[in-house]
C-alpha cells in the first residue's frame, strides 16, 4: 500500500526573515563566531507511484548527471543523453517500490543560488511558503526504486538526489524507506548495485559484504556505441570514460 508523509523542517526563520548570510569564522573579544548552517528544507516523501511524473524524473536524472543505461549515448560535454521516456515508464511500472521526495521550487533555488539572500523571495506571498509541501506543489528532488521477485529477493537502483540538496540525508532517507517497505513484506535479501564512490553511502545505510561471499557479475557481451578512440569501463552501473589504449602493431 502506498504511503506518503510530510517532513516539515523549519526552514523559514521567525517573522519570515531570510536566514543570516554565511560568512567566514572570526574572533571578536576572545569569542569565535562560526557561520550558521542553513536549516534543512521542508520535504515530502512518498511511495505512491502516481506521484512520479516520468518527465520530471528524467529532468532529475539529467540535473544529477545520472544514466539508467549500461551503455548510454554521451553528449559533447561528456554527459549522458536523457533517458528514453518509454523505457523509463516501463521500468517504473515494473518496479515494486518507488520513493519520491519533493521540496518547494523556491527552496531548491535558495540552496542552489550563490546569492541566497534574495533567492527565496522573502516578503510578499508568505502564505505560499508556509503551506506544507505536497507532490502537487513541490519539485521532485530525490528518487529511488527497487525491483523484486515479490517473495525472496530485491535490489535497489537509481537512488539520486538533486545536487543542491545533497549531504542533507535525503538519499539515506530514500534507502531506509525502501528497506522498510521490503522488510515489512518479509523480504530481507536486499542488494544494492553501486559504484566504488557510492560504497560508503550504502555502508552508512546498513549494506556490507555478503556473509555468504557472493559477488556481483555483470553480463559483458554487449557492444558499446562509443567512439573508436574511447573505451568504456564499467563500475557497477556508473561509467568511466578513458582513452583507448592501443596495443602496438605486430606484423
Image: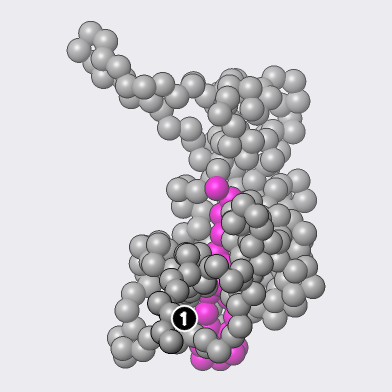
Residue lying furthest front in this view? 251
Residue 178 image point, x, y percent: 54, 70
- Whether residue 125 can be seen here: yes
225 above or below 38? below
Residue depicted at x 66% and y 78%: 95
159 and 49: which one is in front?
159
Q: How is the image coloured?
A: one colour
Residue depicted at x 39% and y 67%: 196
Residue 31 image point, x, y percent: 24, 15
Residue 249 placement: quadrant: bottom left
Which quarter of the figure is the N terminus placed in?
Answer: bottom right
User: Dot 1 corresponds to which residue?
Assistant: 190
45 and 234: which one is in front?
234
Residue depicted at x 58% and y 25%: 115
For the magenta stretch, what is the residue range?
A: 143-163
167 horizontally vs 111: left or right: left
- Whether residue 145 can be seen here: no
Residue 12 placement: quadrant: top right
Which quarter of the figure is the C terminus placed in?
Answer: bottom left
> Is residue 159 in the magenta section?
yes
Picture mark count = 1
Check disc 1: other Cα within 10 Å, few if <14, some if 14-19, many if 20+.
Answer: some
86 horizontally vs 133: left or right: right
Amino acid at each position: 500500500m502506498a504511503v506518503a508523509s510530510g517532513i516539515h523542517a523549519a526552514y523559514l526563520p521567525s517573522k519570515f526573515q531570510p536566514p543570516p548570510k554565511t560568512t567566514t569564522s572570526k574572533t571578536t573579544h576572545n569569542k569565535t563566531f562560526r557561520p550558521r548552517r542553513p536549516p534543512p528544507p521542508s520535504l515530502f516523501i512518498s511511495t505512491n507511484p502516481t506521484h512520479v511524473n516520468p518527465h520530471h524524473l528524467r529532468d532529475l536524472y539529467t540535473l544529477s548527471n545520472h544514466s539508467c543505461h549500461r551503455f548510454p549515448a554521451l553528449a559533447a560535454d561528456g554527459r549522458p543523453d536523457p533517458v528514453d521516456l518509454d523505457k523509463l515508464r516501463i521500468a517504473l511500472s515494473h518496479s515494486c517500490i518507488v520513493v519520491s521526495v519533493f521540496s518547494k521550487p523556491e527552496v531548491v533555488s535558495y540552496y542552489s543560488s550563490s546569492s541566497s539572500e534574495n533567492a527565496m523571495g522573502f516578503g510578499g506571498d508568505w502564505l505560499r511558503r508556509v503551506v506544507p509541501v505536497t507532490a502537487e506543489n513541490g519539485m521532485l528532488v530525490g528518487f529511488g526504486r527497487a525491483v523484486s521477485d515479490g517473495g525472496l529477493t530485491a535490489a535497489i537502483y537509481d537512488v539520486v538526489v538533486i545536487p543542491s540538496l545533497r549531504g542533507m540525508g535525503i538519499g539515506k532517507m530514500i534507502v531506509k524507506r525502501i528497506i522498510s517497505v521490503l522488510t515489512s513484506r518479509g523480504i530481507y535479501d536486499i542488494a544494492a548495485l553501486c559504484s566504488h564512490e557510492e560504497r560508503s553511502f550504502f555502508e552508512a545505510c546498513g549494506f556490507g559484504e555478503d556473509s555468504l561471499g557472493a559477488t556481483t557479475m555483470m553480463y559483458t557481451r554487449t557492444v558499446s556505441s562509443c567512439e573508436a578512440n574511447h573505451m568504456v569501463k564499467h563500475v557497477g552501473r556508473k561509467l568511466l570514460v578513458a582513452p583507448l589504449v592501443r596495443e602496438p602493431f605486430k606484423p
